[in-house]
Amino acid sequence: MARTITIDPVTRLEGHARITLQVDDRGALVAARFHVTELRGFETFCEGRPFSEMPMLTARICGICPVSHQLCAARTGDKLLAVQPPATARGLRQLLNLAQICQSHALSFFYLSSADVLLGWTDDPDRRGIFGLIAADPELARAGIRLRQFGQGVIERLAGRRIHPSWVVPGGVRSALTPATRAWILEHLPEARRTAALALERFKALLDGRLQRDARRFGDLPSLFMALVAADGSWACSDGALRIVDSQGVIVADRLSEDAMPSMIDEAVEPWTYLRFPYLRARGRIDGHYRVGPLARLNVCSGIGTPWADREWREFRQRAGAPVVTSSFAYHHARLVEIVACLEGIARLVDDDSLCQGRVRARAALNANEAIGVSEAPRGTLFHHYVVDDDGLITRINLIIATGQNNRAMNLALEAVAREELPWPIGPGVELPAQLLNRLEAAIRCYDPCLSCSTHAAGAMALQVQLRGADGQVWADDRRP
Amino acid sequence: MTAALPPAKPRLRLATVWLMGCSGCHMAFLDLDEALVSLADRYDIVHSPVLSDRKVFPEGVDVCLVEGAVSSVDNLAMARRLRLRSRLVVALGDCAVTGNVTALRNQHPDGLAGVLQRCWGQAVPPADSPLPPLLERVLPLHAVIRVDLVLPGCPPEPGCIGRLLASLG
Ligand code: SF4
């Protein structure tokens, strides 16, 4: 008799989810599944509304990365107006994006994943999470809280509020950088840099020690990787072109415009999850799966372009001993390297007087009926695709979100971890290893999935592992306290 | 925050719950930043998607902050459970208070089936699907359980959340 293991809810994720493991009659694992159980239907109610409202409305997809949706919606709006925002506005949007990636990565590393990466695998639920870190390492915990606060603080000062600001608009932004904000950023950057250095130091020491095996093998899988890169191939989070590399590091597509997205990417649907599965049409549903996000960005780029981040990037790649880094666990390290890239990028941008002056918005009437915008969100490449009527009302919208693009990888990472942790073959009444729940959840958390975004859904998180037989019967239902 | 509290006040058990929202209200709560650390002087966080790893909503909760509207059978069950086990239920943010953006899906002329068909490609999950059914209409929290306090905003200001928590006893 076959069986299924379910984890519900998955905690410390941004969204509602559950995990099941399905085994066959002989007790062998046939599938590990990550179920996203909510759907919000943003596409339906965006249609019929003006495109100019999209930065505000699509921000409500996600409170962790509202800025990503705003930037992508505004970029799509630029193209509907057929304008290029003034250089000042482009620089300011970039500054906002860097601050956002910095705060989101700090949330992932210090609040959500610190138990997986810093504290060691513990069974005490009260010791997992930020309060566990506060107890174990108050200096690092406070520094982590303040690093997120720095990123949120930049957003607040630049755009008016931390969550769902209304500053980015089609054609540009609403206001320039003020001298006071610039001074605030300059004053707080050194502390943020110290925190990034401290986190990297602690984390790399663990990679050399306790985490050595996880670093290489945890959720290791081959895949394609996709991200934006700048014209010279370096790391970019806005204003770039798409590049795709395979797990050997061979560039399989380069200099692609986001306008190629509809012909390049298709989305599959499965009956057991509301989260769709985007894939590259040319390679098909299975082989065409690709990963996005911090790991993908560091794998596809040919450098970061700022000195400290470049050193960290080289070391990140060297540690893997392979041309590209394929372990899911490496996402955590990649996030820290990107925090460095963001801080250096912010320093470089605020050094430039031009962000404090000049035009910040290009104005035009509607000049196109269809446009696609792209932006690198903290969790990966984000696409907004709008078709509008002559009044600028949306008649068709599609949003391709980072977490969806990592959907297949998350399922494969679960499968890899389940194979390692479960005693096979497995029969009814088996004791599930205590580690199993933690490790399965941790496999998903590597991807820092934002389920609010990906189903344009939301919700609280849950983890229950359910073991189900081939006949669908539940063999074991393990819930953590 | 701590300094303002009379030392005699008892410790309280705090839970936060995420129904259907964007997580922005939880992020506003995290925007208390270092005040979160002093919050722990007064509150035990016994259940929270972002601050705790406890899977089961416990008994004997003093204050429960609820983000999001009620959109699925799971949300409904959770709302009822948290009501039974909490002394004070706070609707945190506009989705919980009015339905807000989450309730915009109610406008679809073909109802839930139309939303699913458009966004997921199927109007109903198959009978053996493990997905919990979604409700035909998204509802604000007060439509399904008694709510003691509301804190509006999309999201509410972090300072308001902090002052609310400091004032409860
Ligand atoms: S009220 Fe606003 S911030 Fe809060 S969950 Fe709803 S959309 Fe998000």
Image (cartoon, rainbow, N blue to C red):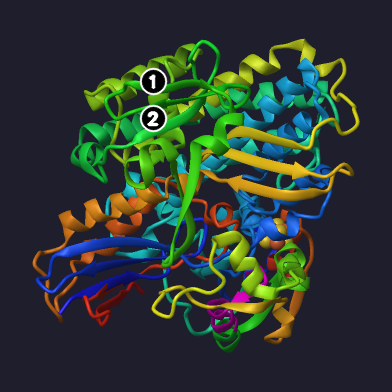
Position of A433 with respect to A244 (left or right) is left
Q: Is residue A339 magenta?
A: no
Of the residues under marks 1 and 2, which one precedes in the sequence?
2
Choose mark 1 or mark 2, whichever is in front: 1
Disc 1: which chain? A
Q: Position of residue B132 (x, y in %)?
A: 49, 76
Most extreme residue toward the bottom is B84
Residue B89 visible (yes or no): yes
Query: What residue range appears in magenta?
Result: B66-79
Crowding at mark 1 (Cα within 10 Å: few <14, some 14-19, many 20+): many
* Residue with the mark numbered 1: A312
Q: Where is A270 relative to B14, above or below?
A: above
* Residue with the mark numbered 2: A200
Q: Nearer the viewer, residue A334 or B13?
A: A334
Q: Where is B140 relative to A219, above or below?
A: below
Disc 2: which chain? A
